[in-house]
Image (tube, rainbow, N blue to C red):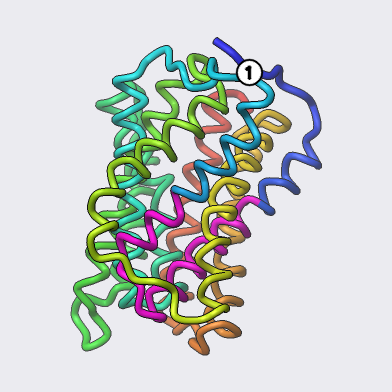
Amino acid sequence: MVGVLPREDKTAAGIGIMVLAVALFTCIDTSAKWLLIAGLPALQVVFARYAGHLLVSLIVYLPQEGLDALRSQSPGKQFLRSVFLLGSTILNFIALSYLPITITTTIQFTMPIMVTLLAIPMLGETVGLRRVIAVCVGFSGVLVVTQPWSAAWHPAMLLSVASVLVASLYFVMTRMLAGIESNATQQLWSSAVSTTILLPFVIKGWVWPPDMQAWMVFMAIGFFGATGHIAATTAHRWADASLLSPMFYTQIVFAAFAGIFVFGTWPTVYTLGGGAIIIGSGLYIWARERKVKGG
């Protein structure tokens, strides 16, 4: 096993770089929506995201660790983890082609809730009644955001929910591999597997970016993906996960900024209200986990 760096006590820096990572994750979604509006196929946008991620990871890690960075201690789980991440991205990007970025981002806030549920059968974790109630409250916030009873409902919202479910499986698999795989191996596998799977599908119907702006975004999306995940991993090495988890909720600010200034869409009262319910539920689950673990 290579490249497993020791933990360091840099809490303030860890929180700061986690916020940066969340901003970069918003840049991924913003870039994807931009490219989809420009007419590029969804699978090609996903390919650009992972091919760029792979290129950056190779540049960063191969000089440090050589080919050992490609060797996995648990290739089966690593492959499954990579497929979950790819599936989540495909579903999210398709949803983004129909929905405002603020809605997809708000739905993504249910991820800690879904991870809590999946950790019961997959990781053998126990969840008390209070957290089960918090999970139910959180999902009521999703109903407020999606409004399945009104004209504002769009079927793509189901794709966004499915994206969060698959991404939650990815994070559960990441927990399983904690302490087994290095950051380099995880970054290289997740990007290489996705790039390899997508290549034969996108090469047939390839569409070139229509202008220089689209070319710049096309090249930047993979950079945002790689640097965002590297930053998030570094943050977890510098600060406790229990302190970093609430930082994900800052994404609503970045998503609202992108929606307003890039796409000209404002978050609705339902998005803000439902988001507040989901965030409140997520923060309660976070607080309960810290208390149970003595954090």
Residue 184 image position (x, y, % from top left): 56, 27
Number of labels in the image equals: 1
Please determine whether, in this image, residue 125 is positioned above or below residue 16. above
Circle 1 packing at 10 Å, graded few (<14), some (14-19), many (20+), is some
Residue 118 image position (x, y, % from top left): 30, 35
Quadrant of the rendering where the C terminus is positioned: top right
Q: Secondary structure at mark 1?
A: loop
Return the residue nearer the eye: 233 or 287.
233
Could you tell me which residue is drawn at 38 percent across and 74 percent down? 36
Could you tell me which residue is drawn at 52 percent across and 46 percent down? 53
Q: Which residue bears the numbered disc 1?
A: 3
Return the residue nearer the eye: 159 or 85.
85
Q: Is residue 29 magenta?
A: yes
Magenta span of residues: 21-50
Picture quadrant of residue 163: bottom left
Could you tell me which residue is drawn at 46 percent across and 54 percent down? 49
Please determine whether, in this image, residue 219 is positioned above or below residue 244. below
Picture quadrant of residue 245: top right
Picture quadrant of residue 250: bottom right
* Left or right: 121 in relation to 102: left
Residue 165 image position (x, y, % from top left): 29, 48
Please determine whether, in this image, residue 131 is positioned above or below residue 67. below
User: Which amino acid type is marked by label 1?
Assistant: Gly
Could you tell me which residue is drawn at 67 percent across and 35 percent down? 234
